Amino acid sequence: MKKIELVYRKILEEALEKKNRSLTQSELSSSLNISLSTVNLAIKHLEKMGAVKIKVRSLEIISPKKILLYWASVRNVEKDIIYKTRSEFSVPEIEKNMPNNIIYAAYSAYKLKFKDMPADYSEVYIYSDNLEEIKKRFKENKNAPNLFILKKEFDKITLAQIFVDLWNLKEWYARDFLKALEEKLHGILE
């Protein structure tokens, strides 16, 4: 994930999950351990579209929805895949056989977060930095992959991350998950 996307992710986590609509660029820079110039560049894109308002000592989040949709449109999940393979296990068996230090993404993340499944799904996406352990459990198989490992750059999944990941998946059931998530986000996006 690009550093600029980590800024969008953090802003949306603050707005949607912590109900905090006022931040400073310095806070973002230090909490993400990225340069102030990268934060400033990310914020400038959002300011141009009226999603944030830059003040003298802070920035105000005006439209989390605009930020979410913008991030979803620039996100490239495919570029973050560090390993993909085919497992003959069922989806529940794949999920059950994961090591402890992973973060579920997309369909699995939605299912775990909301205890709901808008549709059946046949791919598992996870974030992990322990590729060796995953390769031991799921040997490389180049036939139609159904297990995708994304580079892990954070410690927990957020609503916004689930949304943008689902937005970028092409399977028909991604739309069902996305529609269900939009309904859950309806009251908190404005």
Image (tube, grey):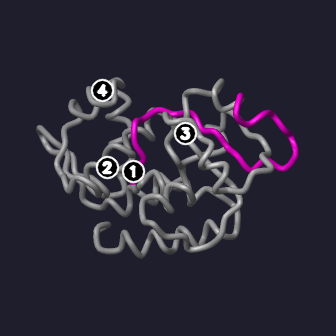
> Residue 145 vs residue 189: left or right?
right
Which disc number belongs to residue 158? 1
Q: Position of residue 61 (x, y in %)?
A: 24, 54
Seen at 41% across and 38% down, the residue is 6
Q: Position of residue 60 (x, y in %)?
A: 19, 51
Quadrant location of residue 175? Answer: bottom right
Distance, label 3 to label 4, CA atoms, is 26 Å
Q: Which residues are magenta?
A: 136-158
Which residue corresponds to mark 2? Answer: 13
Q: Earlier in the sequence, mark 1 or mark 4?
A: 4
Callout 3 environment at 10 Å: few (<14), some (14 to 19), or many (20+)? many
Residue type highlighted by circle 2 = Glu
Query: Is there CB contact under 8 Å for labels 2 and 3?
Result: no
- Please name which of the two marks, 2 or 4, marks the residue nearer to the observer: 2
Distance, label 1 to label 2, CA atoms, is 6 Å
- Please name which of the two marks, 3 or 4, marks the residue nearer to the observer: 3
Q: Earlier in the sequence, mark 1 or mark 3?
A: 3
Q: Position of residue 177 (x, y in %)?
A: 55, 69
Which residue corresponds to mark 4? Answer: 36
Looking at the rendered structure, the secondary structure element under dot 3 is strand
Callout 2 environment at 10 Å: few (<14), some (14 to 19), or many (20+)? some
Which disc number belongs to residue 127? 3
